Image (cartoon, rainbow, N blue to C red):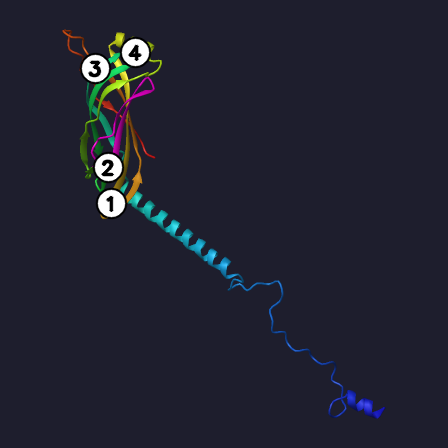
């Protein structure tokens, strides 16, 4: 009995309670560290997404600052002159035409220049396309500059569509109404920075005097026409 008491006590027979378990050194199950990803692949994707988001936000702020500083003004486009020498529709809805125009494009901005990398012209009558000019030259337009381009449509459009009624009416009234659309592909230059590409569209609704018959009186003069500008 005495030996049992001695073994259950300490060195001098005193009892100090149950032994204290050692401290746990491993992390709790189900809890992730806040400073490290368990999956290296997920951690890489997360970092990449954060980087892309930061770049997009930074570029957006830069473009906004440039826009607020330079305040680009709208391009001004006019049909300055037009010469319609042939516009004949026969019974089979075939249109023979010859139309040339002088179209001015005004860049009113003081600090922004424009590269016209591509520009094409399309002619439509009563909603039907009959002419195309893809040979217009590319050019660079400085600030506060006006450039004149000269699209020309000549040829024959076969099976134009149900335009006979409109043609007869407008010929009797003395004016044909033709839509001329310009599709451009441009870049903007601010100082040494080039921004683009942009694809503005210029829509010109042109009123053309009916060409005079042989030996007839000269056609009425053309009226300068402003075009609508639509940025895309």
The image shows residue 169, relative to residue 106, as above or below, that is above
Mark 1 to mark 3 CA distance (whole Å): 44 Å
Crowd around label 1: few <14 · some 14–19 · many ≥20 (10 Å): some
Mark 4 or 1 closer to N-term? Answer: 4
Residue 149 as seen in the image, left or right of residue 203? left
The image shows residue 39, relative to residue 159, as above or below, that is below
Mark 4 or 3 closer to N-term? Answer: 3
| Residue 128 point in image, percent of width and height | 33, 19
User: For the N terminus, which image quadrant?
Assistant: bottom right
Residue to which mark 1 is pinned? 190
Mark 2 or 3 closer to N-term? Answer: 3
The image shows residue 105, relative to residue 66, as above or below, that is above
| Residue 63 point in image, percent of width and height | 33, 46
The magenta-colored residue range is 116-138
Mark 4 to mark 1 CA distance (whole Å): 47 Å
Mark 2 or 4 closer to N-term? Answer: 2
Q: Which of the two residues, 78 or 155, is positioned nearer the viewer here?
A: 155
| Residue 22 point in image, percent of width and height | 65, 78
Crowd around label 3: few <14 · some 14–19 · many ≥20 (10 Å): some
Magenta-colored stretch includes residue 62: no
The nearer-to-camera label among 1 and 2 is: 2
Residue at (20, 33) in percent of width and height: 137
Residue 144 as seen in the image, left or right of residue 13? left
The secondary structure type at the circle numbered 2 is strand
Residue to which mark 2 is pinned? 116
For residue 190, which quarter of the picture? top left
User: For the C terminus, which image quadrant?
Assistant: top left
Residue 85 as seen in the image, left or right of residue 34? left
For residue 182, which quarter of the picture? top left
Residue 167: assigned label: 4
């Amino acid at each position: 009995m005495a030996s049992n008491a001695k073994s259950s006590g300490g060195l001098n027979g005193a009892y100090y309670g149950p032994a204290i378990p050692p401290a746990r050194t491993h992390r709790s199950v189900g809890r992730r560290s806040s400073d490290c990803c368990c999956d290296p692949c997920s951690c890489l994707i997360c970092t990449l997404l954060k980087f892309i988001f930061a770049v997009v936000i930074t570029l957006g702020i830069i473009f906004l600052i440039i826009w607020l500083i330079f305040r680009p003004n709208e391009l001004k486009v006019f049909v300055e002159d037009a010469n319609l020498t042939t516009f004949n529709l026969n019974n089979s809805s075939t249109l023979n035409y010859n139309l040339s125009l002088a179209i001015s494009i005004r860049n009113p901005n003081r600090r922004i220049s424009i590269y016209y990398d591509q520009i094409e012209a399309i002619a439509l009558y009563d909603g039907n396309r009959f002419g195309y000019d893809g040979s217009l030259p590319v050019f660079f337009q400085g600030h506060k500059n006006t450039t004149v381009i000269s699209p020309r449509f000549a040829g024959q459009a076969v099976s134009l569509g149900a335009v006979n009624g409109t043609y007869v009416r407008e010929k009797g009234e003395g004016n044909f109404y033709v839509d001329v659309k310009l599709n451009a592909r441009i870049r903007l230059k601010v100082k040494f920075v080039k921004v683009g590409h942009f694809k503005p569209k210029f829509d010109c609704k042109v009123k053309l005097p009916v060409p005079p018959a042989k030996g007839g009186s000269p056609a009425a003069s053309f009226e300068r026409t402003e075009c609508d500008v639509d940025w895309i």
